[in-house]
């Protein structure tokens, strides 16, 4: 029977697709229809099964067949068939078993039982003529039928067969809300239930405002297996629904618009039409999802679902509502619910914000007053310079007498007084009411007295501080290459942190797994070594400046006449106090900024904050101020990136003892330094081996709390810097080296650096090998940085020296400390103001990095002028060695 059927179908297809005149075509179509009807009647008689009911038949054909109303006698089984076509000819598929008669379901639910994917290739209109009825079909004749196996039918949902990932990953949408509303309404109470009832009715009535609410809610769209865990919807659309816009206003805007395309588009966007009868709020629901079907989700995943719901619903009610939803396939558990509209935090009432505001006002007033005072002094100096020129010329009687007054540009601070020095031999007398400037008095030294308070006020002069930051002159006995190393290392840190943050809020986070396999991506993963560069530079500058200052005898002035132990103690307290005063002012300010901003983000941002500083900073900020926060668990750390400041300050304290001891017992100091260095290496190796730490390029921050941020594992690079500074001091920046040796040194240095950056690409270390790499890698990096500094400072740097010593880099180098403090705040600010995940690409990451770097350095410049530079100037004023204040 089936062979006869296939032969008839094939014959009909051959004759049906051949172009013929209209009369012959009508005859062939009639024969084809008669053959199909007879064939199906014979099949049903042979199988003993009845025909399909009318509802299911109409749903199968769907929008392709227009079926007029037929009487009971006209309802035949001739049209109750499933007709599909492929490229090879007509095929038929029986996909239905016995139809339930006891439980009648809707035609839509029955159509879900059809396990076919239809691909249309060539439509062909078919007209069936029957007595008293005309059935016109537009069913495509050429189709491809693909049966989906196996059917995914979760327990309890046997009446639903899911096709495609979109139907499987449903959690809470309009259809589920309407179907389960009778049960879900018990999860909410009060006005929330009332408004949700109105929302459900609006969906049933297809009200525009209800459809917009559904449109602004999140759902699965795509890229679930590409790392899209953010189904956020649109918080902006949900918020805009609270603004009631009339249709008439939209038409008025349309008529006044100059762009026809824009005018047509405005008719359908969110700002047109009436809003809902209640206020809306956007809720971000963080939940864990899993399923018994391992082929879909192998492990538990965290999803972020955005929902636009009535504002009268609280976060707890939304949690209960979503928890009680019966999803078709997924099992979910709500972890947290956040709502930007509901908020819950007012920064105006926060004492931390009030303190920040007060400090900012005071500092701003000091900056303005000091700058005005500085400009007044500069104006007076210029006026006096002109009077000196005029009076000297008149007294000499020679019109062509010229005095070189270019030296009148400094205030030399000395014991609370300032002297405007004109070429070191012309002084200005301001103590007499009648000023007399003659050639005779021009050769005397008289002082312009300024109180210590005036000098401290001038420390806040924006003019002087800006000139100091942008000053491109350095001393001949300094190490200018550190400016380039600082700047490039800071950019490397910003680049690494940018990649970490943006990948967290991307809809294609799995892209990182692909990029990590790239050879050049190791440049980003190896940004951890930039911190070792800063450790090395810190130790180098401390050692070099300390030994040079001690050699000039300046330290003896502070401790002269005191026992060595007492003198050493005074030196230690002075060094620690100087560092604490210099670092703490901008650090404290940024601690307050981080606490306030993270509190606001935690309550008002769509996305979850990357850290819990809003919880840790109010409780543990004092650890940051004492620079001991790395001695506690990382979960309790406020301002996570401050671990570097804590370690660096602890290294500074240990090194201060070693350097003070080196002035009187150099060998003992050297032995202790070596012991500390070797102990740090062995400690790092032991911790790595015992914790089974495996260094790899995919996650350089593994074991962060055990290895990465602990001072006993990061001491090595700082001690390498101490040794490098001592070498530069002892050689006085002069080392004679043959061309062969410095070429060998550069080759070895480049090889080690490249091996550390790219060596882990494709490598898998374990056991002792992994422990050795963890122990030596950071110190080896610092040793190579030390070689670069020594080579460039002693005339063997080649093209590297002018690159790292470029004066253009000096201003950026001087604000790297503030840039380090502020750049993560800028990153978080940008990320927390997003309402949608970022779709990352290689070019986009680079563009984000450039923008964030520019903003970070600009804000660092502002903070340095306001906080860091005034403190540095005041420390110079109160210290025994004072430098002139530039006018």
Image (tube, grey):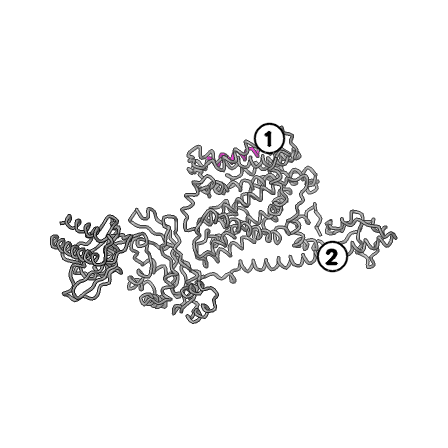
Q: Sequence-wise, which precedes: disc 2 or disc 1?
A: 2
At which x and y percent is residue 762? Answer: 43, 36
**Residue carrying label 1:** 742
Note whether 157 is above or below 513 in the view shown: below
Over which residues does the magenta segment extend?
A: 672-685
Residue 726 falls in image quadrant: top right
At which x and y percent is residue 886? Answer: 70, 50
Number of numbered discs: 2
Relative placement, left or right, of 835 versus 79 is: right
Q: Secondary structure at mark 2?
A: helix
User: Is residue 628 visible from the viewing direction of this image?
Assistant: yes
- Residue extending farthest right: 397
At which x and y percent is residue 426? Answer: 80, 49
Between 203 and 172, the one lying in front of the other is 203
Neighbour tally class for label 2: few under 14, some 14-19, many 20 plus, Cα within 10 Å: few
Quote the CA–CA distance across marks 2 and 1.
53 Å
Task: Identify the disc placed on residue 379.
Answer: 2
Note whether 105 is above or below 774 in the view shown: below
Neighbour tally class for label 1: few under 14, some 14-19, many 20 plus, Cα within 10 Å: some
Relative placement, left or right, of 22 versus 646 is: left
At which x and y percent is residue 748? Answer: 54, 31
Between 874 and 93, the one lying in front of the other is 93
User: Is residue 619 visible from the viewing direction of this image?
Assistant: no
Q: Secondary structure at mark 1?
A: helix
């Amino acid at each position: 029977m089936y062979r006869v059927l296939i032969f008839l179908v094939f014959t009909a297809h051959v004759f049906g697709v051949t172009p013929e005149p209209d009369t012959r075509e009508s005859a062939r179509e009639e024969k084809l229809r008669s053959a199909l009807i007879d064939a199906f009647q014979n099949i049903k008689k042979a199988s003993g099964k009845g025909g399909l009911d009318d509802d299911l038949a109409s749903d199968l054909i769907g929008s392709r067949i227009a079926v007029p109303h037929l009487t009971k006698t006209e309802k035949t089984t001739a049209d109750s068939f499933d007709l599909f076509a492929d490229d090879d000819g007509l095929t038929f598929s029986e996909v239905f078993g016995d139809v339930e008669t006891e439980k009648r379901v809707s035609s839509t639910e029955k159509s879900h039982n059809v396990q076919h994917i239809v691909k249309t290739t060539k439509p062909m209109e078919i007209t069936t003529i029957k007595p008293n009825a005309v059935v016109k079909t537009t069913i495509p004749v050429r189709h491809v039928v693909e049966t989906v196996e196996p059917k995914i039918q979760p327990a309890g949902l046997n009446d639903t067969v899911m096709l495609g990932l979109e139907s499987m990953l449903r959690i809470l949408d309009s259809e589920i809300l309407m179907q389960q509303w009778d049960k879900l309404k018990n999860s909410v109470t009060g006005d929330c239930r009332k408004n949700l009832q109105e929302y459900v009715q609006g969906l049933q009535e297809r009200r525009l405002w209800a459809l917009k609410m559904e449109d602004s809610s999140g759902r699965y769209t795509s890229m679930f297996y590409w790392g899209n865990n953010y189904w956020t919807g649109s918080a902006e659309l949900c918020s805009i629904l609270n603004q009631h816009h009339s249709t008439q206003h939209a038409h008025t805007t349309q008529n006044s618009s100059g762009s026809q395309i824009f005018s047509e588009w405005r008719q359908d966007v969110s700002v047109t039409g009436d809003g809902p009868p209640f206020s809306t709020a956007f809720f971000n629901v963080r939940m864990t999802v899993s399923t018994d079907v391992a082929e879909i989700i192998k492990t538990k995943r965290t999803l972020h679902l955005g929902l636009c719901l009535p504002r009268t619903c609280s976060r707890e009610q939304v949690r209960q509502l979503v928890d009680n939803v019966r999803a078709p396939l997924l099992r979910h558990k709500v972890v947290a619910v956040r709502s930007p509209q509901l908020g819950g935090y007012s920064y105006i009432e926060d004492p931390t914000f009030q303190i920040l505001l007060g400090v900012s006002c005071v500092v701003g007033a000091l900056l303005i007053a000091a700058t005005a005072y500085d400009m007044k002094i500069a104006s007076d100096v210029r006026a006096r310079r002109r009077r000196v020129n005029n009076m000297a010329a008149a007294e000499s009687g020679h019109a062509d007498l010229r005095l070189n007054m270019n030296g009148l540009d400094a205030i030399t601070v000395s014991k609370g007084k300032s002297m405007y020095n004109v070429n070191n031999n012309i002084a200005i007398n301001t103590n007499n009411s009648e000023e007399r400037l003659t050639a005779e008095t021009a050769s005397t030294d008289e002082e312009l007295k300024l109180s210590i308070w005036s000098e401290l006020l001038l420390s806040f002069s924006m003019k002087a501080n800006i000139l100091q930051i942008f000053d491109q002159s350095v001393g001949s006995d300094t190490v200018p290459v550190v400016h380039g190393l600082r700047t490039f290392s800071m950019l490397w840190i910003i680049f690494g942190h940018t990649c970490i943050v943006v990948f967290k809020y991307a809809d294609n986070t799995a892209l990182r797994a692909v990029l990590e396999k790239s050879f050049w991506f190791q440049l980003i993963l190896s940004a951890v070594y930039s911190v070792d560069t800063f450790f090395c530079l810190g130790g180098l500058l401390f050692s070099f400046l300390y030994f040079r200052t001690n050699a000039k005898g300046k330290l003896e002035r502070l401790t002269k006449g005191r026992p060595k132990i007492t003198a050493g103690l005074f030196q230690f307290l002075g060094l620690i106090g100087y560092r604490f005063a210099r670092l703490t002012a901008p650090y404290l300010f940024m601690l307050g900024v981080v606490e306030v901003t993270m509190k606001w983000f935690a309550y008002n941002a769509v996305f979850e904050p990357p850290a819990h500083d809003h919880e840790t900073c109010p409780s543990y900020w004092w650890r940051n101020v004492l620079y001991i926060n790395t001695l506690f668990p990382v979960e309790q750390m406020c301002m996570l990136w401050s671990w570097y400041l804590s370690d660096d300050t602890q290294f500074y304290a240990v090194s201060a003892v070693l350097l003070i001891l080196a002035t009187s017992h150099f060998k003992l100091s050297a032995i202790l330094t070596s012991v500390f260095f070797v102990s740090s290496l062995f400690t790092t190796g032991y911790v790595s081996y015992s914790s089974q730490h495996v260094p790899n390029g995919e996650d350089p921050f593994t074991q962060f709390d055990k290895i990465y941020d602990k001072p006993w594992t990061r001491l090595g690079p700082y001690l390498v810097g101490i040794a490098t500074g001592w070498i530069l001091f002892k050689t006085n920046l002069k080392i004679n080296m043959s061309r062969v040796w410095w070429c060998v040194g550069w080759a070895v240095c480049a090889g080690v650096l490249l091996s550390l950056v790219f060596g882990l690409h494709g490598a898998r270390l374990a056991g002792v090998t992994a422990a050795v790499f963890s122990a030596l890698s950071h110190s080896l990096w610092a040793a190579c940085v030390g070689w670069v500094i020594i080579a460039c400072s002693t005339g063997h740097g080649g093209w590297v020296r002018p690159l790292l010593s470029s004066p253009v880099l000096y201003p950026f180098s001087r604000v790297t400390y503030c840039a380090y403090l502020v750049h993560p705040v800028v990153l978080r600010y940008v990320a927390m103001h997003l309402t949608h995940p970022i779709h990352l690409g290689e070019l986009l990451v680079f563009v984000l990095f450039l923008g964030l770097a520019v903003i970070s350095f600009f804000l660092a410049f502002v903070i340095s002028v306001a906080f860091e530079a005034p403190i540095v100037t005041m420390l110079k004023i109160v210290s025994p060695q004072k430098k002139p204040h530039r006018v």
